[in-house]
Amino acid sequence: MSETTALTETGEVIQVLHVDDQSDVADLTATFLERADDRFTVETASSADCGLERIDERRPDCIVSDYNMPGMNGLEFLEAVRERYPDLPFILFTGKGSETIASEAISAGVTDYLQKGSGTERYDLLANRIRNAVRTRREARRADRQQQLMRLTEFVGDTGGWELDRGSDTVLLTAGARRAIGRPDRAEIPLEEAIALFHPDDREDVRQTLTEAFEAGEELERRWRLQSRDGDERLIDMTITPVVESGGTVTKLRGAGHDVTDREERRRELETYETIIEALTDAVYVLDEEGRFTYVNDEFVELVGYDRETILGSTPSLIKDADAVEQGENQLRRLLSSDGPETIPFEVTLQPREGDPIVCTDHMGVLPYEGDQFDGSVGTLRDVTAARERERTLERQNDLFTKAQDIADVGAWGYDVQTDEAFLTDKAYAIHGLSPADELTPERSLGFYHPEDRPAIRDAFDRAVEGGESYDLELRLIDTADTRRWVRTRGDAELEDGNVVRVRGTVQDITEHKRRERALEDRTEKLDTLTTELEEQYRHLFEEAPLMAVVTRAQEGNPVIEDCNDLFVDTLGYEKSELVGAQLERVYTAESQRKLLDEGGYERALRDEFVHENRALVTADGETVETLFRAVPRKRTPEGSRGTLAFYVNISERKRLERERDRLEEFTSIVSHDLRNPLTVAGGHIELAGEECDSDHLARVADAIDRSQALIDDLLTLAREGKDVTGSDPVQLTDVAKRSWETVDTEHATLEVNATQVIRAGRSRLQQLFENLYRNAVEHGGDGVTVHVGDLDGGFYVADTGSGIPESDRDEIFEAGYSTADHGTGFGLRIVEQIVEAHGWDIRVVDGERRGARFEITGVETAH
C-alpha cells in the first residue's frame, strides 16, 4: 500500500491555505489541487496579512505561499508563521526561483520549496508535497502522545513507573518497574496483584493513598516497602500524580518510584561512624565525589575557625590556596591509580578563618567503592605548625660556613681581626684554584685580583676592618691556572663593644652571569639597530601601501588621527596638516559616524575585536567615497594611551556595480513574476478548455505560450548570468558534452563525442553552452542531424550536419533576437557568446567537414 493510499484511507480532511496576490493563479491552483485529492479543501488569501488572519481564525493543515507579493513577501510571511506555529507545514510555491531564495527559505524553516512551471504536472507534484508534509506532522504528534508515559515516569526513578486505570483497575508497568518486581514479561497486572507486591503492613496504606489521590486529584508522596519474589525487601519513595480529564474527573494515576534502600543503610552506618570519629583527637573530614565537604568533626571545626554550616557543602578552597588545592587533587589521583597506596600522608598549609596559616600533616584515603563509581575521600589533619617552626629556627642557626658550602659557586670566608687568621670554605679555595692545604692570607688573597681592581678591594677590606663598613663588589680574579674570572665578593663586619672583631663574607663565581650580561648587551644593541631598520621599512610600507592607512589614538573615547598615508590624504583631497590631530569623525558621513561612536565600532576595535565593516568617507569637496574598513588595536604606548591601525579600501566603483546589479535583479524579478504568472494561468486554462472542446486553435495558443516561456528563460539567463565566471575547476569535456545532451530534447538527432581534453571552466556555464549549441543544431538541422564534439589545438568544436550558416549571416547570428527558425527565441547563440566571453575564450563559425555549421571555441586553458 502506498503512503498516499494509506493516508487517504484514514478519511482525514486536509485543510490547505493558498496565499498568492494573483487571484487567477490562486483559483487555478485550488482547482487542480482539489481535483488531485478529494480530501483537499483549499482556501485562498490575496496577501500574507490576510493569510495570518485566516490562520488565527481556523488553523489549516498546510500553507502554500507565493514569494513575490506586495507588502510582506513569502519569506517574511514564513518567519511570521514560524513565530506562532513552529511545526505548521509551509510550502513556498513561487515563480521567482533562485538558490539565494531557496537557501533563505530553508534557514527560516520552510517545509518544502517548489517552483511554478508551465505545465499542470507541477500541481500533481505540489499535491504530493502537501500530503507528505501533513502526514509527517500527524504521525509525529501521535508518537509524542505514545511516549508521554515514559517521559513522565521512567526517567525520574531507578525503580520505574506505572499507570493505574480507574475503570479497569489494571496497572500498566514500564520496563523498569517490571524488572524491579521480577516480572519482566508482565506489562499489565490487576490492581490487587500490584498491592500484594508491598509489605503486608503497608498494603492498607497503599489502598487508602490511591483512593485519596483519585478523590482529591492532588499529587502525593509516600514511602513503602516493596517485596520481590525472592523475598528481598526494598524501600521505595513513591510519587503519585493524578491524570485529570477535561471535565475535571481523575481517570488515571501515574506513579514513579525511587529505590532509597541503599541510601538509608548508608545513613545508619554513617551515624555509627560519626560516633567513633567524634571521639578522635585529630581533625577528620569527608569529601564527596565532587570534592565538597559532607562531614567534619568538632576538632576540624575548631582547627579552621569556620562554623559547621559554612564548611559543609564547600570545597577545600575555603581553607586552602590554589597550590594547596592542586596538591590535594594530585594526591587523590595517586590514591585512585591502579597501583596507588591505600592512604597517603603529606604536608599541607591551611588558612583558617582568622590568624596565621597552619601547617598540617594530612593522612588521606578514599571511601570504599566498587567498579568505577568513586564515592569520595576521607582524611585526618594533625597540626604540626609548632614542630615545623622549631625546625626552621634550627636551620637558621646553622653556621654560615656550612650553609655557604652547599651553595653552588659560592664560597665563604672569615677573618679574625684579633688573631689575624683567615678561614675559607672548600668552595672559596676552589674559586682561587687552591686546595685547603694551601695557606691563603688576606694579603695573598688580594694578589689574585686583577691589578686594576686591587685598589678597590684593598680599600673596601680596610674600611670594613677599621670602620665596620660592609661592601659588595664585582671584580676580576685571576686564579692559579691564570684563568680570568669575574667574582662577586661581599664582606660584613661583626662588632663587640663597638669594636670590629671579625669580618665575614662570601665570594661567588659570576663569570657565566657576566658572559650572559655581555651577550645580552650585544643582542640589545643589534635589536636596536634592527628595530630602527624595521621602523624605516614599516614607514615605507605605510606610505606606499595601495590601501588608505590611518593611525588613531583614543582621546576621551573618540578617535583622533595621529598619522595617515599619502593615499588617504590624496583620496580625500585635504592637506595632511589638516587631518593629523583632527577627530576621525570629521571625514565620516553621518551614518558612518553612528557606526563609529554610537554603535561602539571604535570601542570594539580597542578591545582587540577585529572590526571589518563598510564605512563612507567625505572628501574635502563634499563627495562620498565608499570604503571597506578594517581596524585592529595598536600596542599601548609607554604613556598608556590606546589607539587603532585602520585600512580603507576604496570600493566606490564596486558599489556602483552592485547598484546596477540590484536594478538588473529588479528587472529579472518583474520578468519572472509578472510575465510567468499570466502565462502559467493561461496554460492552465488552455488545458482545462482542452478537456471541454477540441480545437486546433488551442494547440497553437499552447505552443505560443511555450515559446513565450522559452523566451523568458533565455532573457533571464542573459540578464542573470553576467560576464564573469565565479569558479573554475578541471572539467572533462566528454563528461559534460554527454550530460548536456541528456538534458536537451534532441528527438532523433545523434551525438558523437571524440573530445579527450580536461579543461578549466565553470561546469554549469560550460553545460549551458553545450545545451544551447545542441538546441541550435536540432532547430536548424532537423530530426536526422548528427552533432559532433571534438578537440582543437587550444580548445574544442561543436559541429552538425545541418544546412550550415551562410558566410554573410555569420556576423549576425550572435546578436540577441536573431533567429531563422520558426520556433527559435533568437537568444540561444547570444547566450553561447556570453559564456565564451565570461571565460575569456574566442568563438567563430566555419563550414563543417560534413556540411552544416562548425562552432570553434579557442583560447581554452587545459588542466594539468
Image: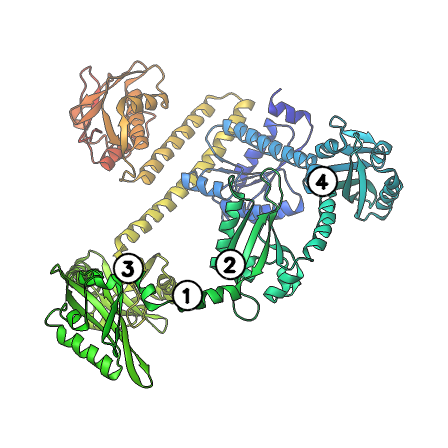
- Dot 4 surroundings within 10 Å: few (below 14), some, or many (20 or more)? many
- On the image, numbered disc 4 is attached to which residue? 153
* N-terminal-most mark, 3 or 1: 1
**What secondary structure is marked by label 3?**
loop
Question: Which numbered dot is residue 395?
Answer: 1
Report the amino acid beneath label 1.
Answer: Glu
* N-terminal-most mark, 4 or 2: 4
Closer to us: mark 4 or mark 2? 2
- On the image, numbered disc 2 is attached to which residue? 348
Q: Residue at x 28, y 62 (%)?
A: 645
Q: Residue at x 17, y 79 (%)?
A: 459
The front one of 227 and 626 is 227
Report the amino acid beneath label 3.
Answer: Ala
- Dot 1 surroundings within 10 Å: few (below 14), some, or many (20 or more)? few
**Count of marks, rendered view:** 4
Closer to us: mark 4 or mark 1? 1
* N-terminal-most mark, 3 or 4: 4
Q: Can you give x and y, in whole percent of width and height, for residue 357 in the image?
A: 52, 66
- On the image, numbered disc 3 is attached to which residue? 408
Query: CA separation, marks 3 and 1?
Result: 18 Å
Report the amino acid beneath label 4.
Answer: Thr
Q: Residue at x 69, y 42 (%)?
A: 156
Q: Can you give x and y, in whole percent of width and height, for residue 87 in the image?
A: 59, 41
**What secondary structure is marked by label 1?**
helix
Horizontal relation, residue 50 to residue 822: left or right: right
Residue 267 in sight here? yes
